[in-house]
Image (cartoon, rainbow, N blue to C red):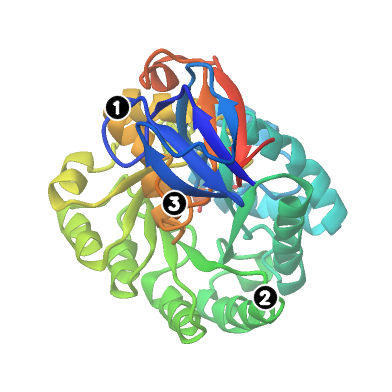
Amino acid sequence: MKKAWINGRVLTGAEGTDPQPLEILTEAGRIVDLAPAVDRNGAELVDCGGALVTPALVDCHTHLVHGGDRAREFEMRLDGASYEDIARAGGGIVSTMRATRACSVDDLVASALPRLDHLLAEGVGTVEIKSGYGLRIETELDMLRAARRLAELRPVRVVTSWLAAHALPEDYKGRGADYVADVAIPGLEQAVAEGLVDAVDGFCEGIAFTVEELEPLFEAARAMGLPVKLHAEQLTRSGGTQLAARHGALSVDHLEYATAEDAAAMAAAGSVAVLLPGAYYMLREEQVPPVQALRAAGVPIALATDCNPGTSPVTSILMTLNMGAVLYRLTVAECLAGVTAHAARALRLGAETGRIAPGLSADFALWDAALPANLVNRIGFNPLKARVFKGDFV
Ligand code: DI6
Ligand code: FE
């Protein structure tokens, strides 16, 4: 069935902030034409009523599936404990591990659904979801089974990442290399056999894994034909960006402590910089990622919620846009590309979604907004009018 989407002010998601009076022709869930006047012959007319039409948003870095809650640790941080203090005392990621291990796949799905629904209500059409709170094979697999299930329960595209190398459980304390060899790599093989994994991620940090420990995991990933990505230079400069770039990473994420040299390595590797201002804000971080160096090197910048129970309990992609602009001084155009075209590229979906262009999936968000800047400048206001996924209103 053909549909002609008319009377929209279209922002294609590639560049800029000037919506164009374009019509979109879709067929069988895909965009087949984009023009001032498309051929309406045989097409159902869909009147967008003057709405701002953007690509459906892409949240390219989340830990949406997990058990439990960390509000107690939030209170501890208000009392002066640092994130690293709490992690070293058995809190942090490991406390969410305990809660997650106690959950069934059904429990994980049930607790993730309201978070997912919050993202969808703000125009998200594609979401990346990581494992990383099981820290043992069975629970890591369950997290990704839950992620895949979410895509059956809601009209959304889910992309998964294997993040078994997120933290060390008690029984592997001080033995990162053993954990990678015993859990992260064999678990990945099982996850791949079950069709659960789209990419492999890791946390390269003083409180997590070193470059040397992650290297064999990335080698194994690439031998299995999987792309890699990495949490790097979030709390300290650990050299993870160089590791990721050597392995042609899809993205390098966080990057507060990255350098101009790191930006150059990312540019050469074609990696996207995924900035996560929610975590920066929650940790009261003071070091801003090297935005100017990323721009100068021509590295595409994406923005994501990092939705997780500890450092970024954020389920608002619109709030994330505002934080990207205010805290990192990104322009409105950069913010919008950061949750559309560049975010899709970070998920290797640049030819599938994140832009309005012929050949791509018909994933749109319709907004009651005069200007694209209205999606960025307001806090706590959601102007979404409608969401379209694969050519249908949802
Ligand atoms: N960096 C983060 O910000 C999250 N994971 C990571 O590697 C934090 C996850 C958590 O604290 O639960
Ligand atoms: Fe993260």
> Where does the image place residue 168, in percent across and percent down from the top left?
59, 65
Q: Which residue is tagged 2?
A: 191
Q: Amino acid at mark 2?
A: Ala
Confirm whether residue 70 shows in the render: yes
Residue closest to the far front? 41
Q: Secondary structure at mark 3?
A: helix
Q: CA distance from mark 3 to mark 2?
A: 23 Å
Which of discs 1 and 2 lies nearer the camera? The answer is 1
User: Left or right: 19 with respect to 70?
Assistant: left
Q: Amino acid at mark 3?
A: Ala
Quarter of the image where one finds residue 139 = bottom right
- Reading the chain from its start, which is encountered first: label 1 or label 2? 1
User: Contact, CB < 8 Å: mark 3 with mark 2?
Assistant: no
Q: Secondary structure at mark 2?
A: helix
User: Left or right: 79 with respect to 276?
Assistant: right
> Where does the image place residue 185, in percent across and percent down from the top left?
58, 81
Quadrant location of the C terminus in the rendered image: top right
Residue at 51% in and 79% down:
177
Q: CA distance from mark 1 to mark 2?
A: 41 Å
> Where does the image place residue 251, in percent across and percent down from the top left?
38, 58
Q: Which residue is tagged 3?
A: 344
Comparing 378 with 140, the one in front is: 378
Q: CA distance from mark 3 to mark 1?
A: 18 Å
Comparing 381 with 310, the one in front is: 381
Confirm whether residue 205 shows in the render: no
Estimate how packed mark 1 is, as few (under 14), some (14 to 19) or many (20 or more) residues with alpha carbons within 10 Å.
Answer: some
Q: Secondary structure at mark 1?
A: loop
Q: Amino acid at mark 1?
A: Thr
Q: Which residue is tagged 1?
A: 17
- Reading the chain from its start, which is encountered first: label 3 or label 2? 2
Residue at 27% in and 38% down:
15
